[in-house]
Image: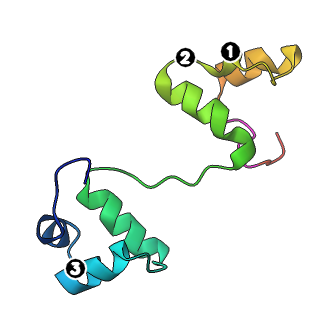
Amino acid sequence: MALGFKQKDMAPRVDMARQQYQRLEAKENPRLETLELVAAGLNSDLMLIPRERLDAVLAVLAGDGPTKRSDVPDGERSSIADDPWKGLLGDPE
């Protein structure tokens, strides 16, 4: 709605029937594949980000860099600035 699209506009953009898109907007519990189609129809990507890393990812995307996060210990700030995706999923270094 914020982009000015109506259901009749979105259905072909996301390559699904209008009725299917109506159900999606009516709070249906969509599959991940369906959400990816909707994101693609909006020229967007769907991202799954661990909650504890959301602030760091948003800072990187905004160009602010994650070094401004107060909850990042001083010893980790430079490593996050050098590689903001390092350890994102809790994988061993």
Q: Which residue is mark 2?
A: 64
Between discs 2 and 3, the one toward the N terminus = 3
Q: Residue at x 33, y 82 (%)?
A: 23
Position of residue 17 relative to residue 27, above or below, is below
Q: Which residue is mark 1?
A: 68
Determine which of the numbered discs, if any, sits on residue 16 in the image. Answer: 3
Between the C-alphas of marks 3 and 1, the distance is 42 Å
Position of residue 91 relative to residue 80, above or below, is below
Quadrant of residue 64 within the rendered picture: top right
Q: How many dots with numbers?
A: 3
Position of residue 9 relative to residue 44, above or below, is below
Whether residue 87 is in magenta: the answer is yes
x and y, in percent, of residue 68 in the image: 68, 15
Circles 1 and 2, Cβ within 8 Å, touching? The answer is: yes
User: Identity of the amino acid at label 3?
Assistant: Met
Quarter of the image with the N terminus is bottom left
> In the image, which residues are magenta?
85-89
User: Identity of the amino acid at label 1?
Assistant: Lys
x and y, in percent, of residue 37 in the image: 32, 68
Kind of element beneath mark 3:
loop
Between discs 3 and 1, the one toward the N terminus = 3
Note whether residue 18 is visible. yes
Kind of element beneath mark 1:
helix
Side of 40 relative to 62 (left or right): left
